[in-house]
């Protein structure tokens, strides 16, 4: 009896001690989070981290200030990458998708939600209007994503719109725009390495298949793949899907660069800000990205509002409206044009007509993956 009475206070003291240690740990972690040097960009997660929010009574009353502080602390919590990776492992015990990414064996695949019919119709109307106002041949490439090519590997009842039917529906409404069929050529080669395992882009091999299909439609002959020298530039690429999950169970990707022997060296004029002088860059590759996480930016660099490429070849001029899928496609196209101008309207706040005149080009190509097109191409 006396022993039980003595044990009671001891258990309470031990429990209180554990609580104090736990709160001391949390306090120490919070202090370390506050005093540690702050990074603006997470290399692993491939995104900019939240900055500390400015304070105002209005923000405090609305709750936006406390939400901002919470996001700031989460982003800068010491060893946050470890917590993201651990969260992924925990979620995988109950589900196969994490942060919008399905983990399928040795492949990561992005979840594609139901497209907005109004946005799609606006895109189609914009293309048709463009074609009516332009006397030059206008082409459209819509590249299906991994979610379509590997839909049979997705969890049962996973939301996944039929991209083949979506592309066919878009094609049926085009007026004056020629759809280049990428679905068929990519689907035939779906078991080849045509998409990265950890990133949302197609590989150089996938881009070559698109180039060959485009060449047939646009009036010239693609070089056989055997004509190209292949440089295996990296074998440790972990792309945008990895950044969202930090899941290490997928084999890192390989980055390959295809080039024609004795081809002239193109010169790129990169307009990172409209109205500013362009950066002049020799060649189509930024090899310094091979030593960084964002290895896909080896192809033509990061997304920019406008890039003009003087290829050094004889030929016609191509105007391209695009997303980043075009970056590994353009090196193949360069051998068939004297000049290629690329516009990414997601980063342009002025009408494209203030930047270029489509009538000065011989052909116009719109090049997007289906997910980008579903979101809206913002053609003005």
Image (cartoon, helix red, strand yellow):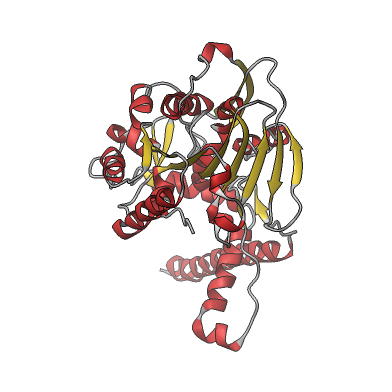
Q: Residue at x 57, y 33 (%)?
A: 330
Task: Spot the residue most to the front.
Answer: 135
Residue 179 placement: quadrant: top left
Front-most of residues 24 and 67: 67
Q: Is residue 246 visible?
A: no
Q: Residue 311: x, y in percent?
A: 67, 30
Tell me: residue 35, above or below residue 237.
below
Q: Residue at x 32, y 45 (%)?
A: 174
Q: Is residue 353 left or right of residue 180?
A: right
Front-most of residues 16 and 124: 124
Q: Residue 236: x, y in percent?
A: 60, 29
Quadrant in the picture for the N terminus: bottom left
Front-most of residues 54 and 126: 126
Q: Residue 226: x, y in percent?
A: 54, 11
Q: Residue 292: x, y in percent?
A: 68, 38
Q: Is residue 375 left or right of residue 296?
A: left
Q: Is residue 67 visible?
A: yes
Q: Residue at x 30, y 35 (%)?
A: 151
How many numbered marks, from 0 up? 0
């Amino acid at each position: 009896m006396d022993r039980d009475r003595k044990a009671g206070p001891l258990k309470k003291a031990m429990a209180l001690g554990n609580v104090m240690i736990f709160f001391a740990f949390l306090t120490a972690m919070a202090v370390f989070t506050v005093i540690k040097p702050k990074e603006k960009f997470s290399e692993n997660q491939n995104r900019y981290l939240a900055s500390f929010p400015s304070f105002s009574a209005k923000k405090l009353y609305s709750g936006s200030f406390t939400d901002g502080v919470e996001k700031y602390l989460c982003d800068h919590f010491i060893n946050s990458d470890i917590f993201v990776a651990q969260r992924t492992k925990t979620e995988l015990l109950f589900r196969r998708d994490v942060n919008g990414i399905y983990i399928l064996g040795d492949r990561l695949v992005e979840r594609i939600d139901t497209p907005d019919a109004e946005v799609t119709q606006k895109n189609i109307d914009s293309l048709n209007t463009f074609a009516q106002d332009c006397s030059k041949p206008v082409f459209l490439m819509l590249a299906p994503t991994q979610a379509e090519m590997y839909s049979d590997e997705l969890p049962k009842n996973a939301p996944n719109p039929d991209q083949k039917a979506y592309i066919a529906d878009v094609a049926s409404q085009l007026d004056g725009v020629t759809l280049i069929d990428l679905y068929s050529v990519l689907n035939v080669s779906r078991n080849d390495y045509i998409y990265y395992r950890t990133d949302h882009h197609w590989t150089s091999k996938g881009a070559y298949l698109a180039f060959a299909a485009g060449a047939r439609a646009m009036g010239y002959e693609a070089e056989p793949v055997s004509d190209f020298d292949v440089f295996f530039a990296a074998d440790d690429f972990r792309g945008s899907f990895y950044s969202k999950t930090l899941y290490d169970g997928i084999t890192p990707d390989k980055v390959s660069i295809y080039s024609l022997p004795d081809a002239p060296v193109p010169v790129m004029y990169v307009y990172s800000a409209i109205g500013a002088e362009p950066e002049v860059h020799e060649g189509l590759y930024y090899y310094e990205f091979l030593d960084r996480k964002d290895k896909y930016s080896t192809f033509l660099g990061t997304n920019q509002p406008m890039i003009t490429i003087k290829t050094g070849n004889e030929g016609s001029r191509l105007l391209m409206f695009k997303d980043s899928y075009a970056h590994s496609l353009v090196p193949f196209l360069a051998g068939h044009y004297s000049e290629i101008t690329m516009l990414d309207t997601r980063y342009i706040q002025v009408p494209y007509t203030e930047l270029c005149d489509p009538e000065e080009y011989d052909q116009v190509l719109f090049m997007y993956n289906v997910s980008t097109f579903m979101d809206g191409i913002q053609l003005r």
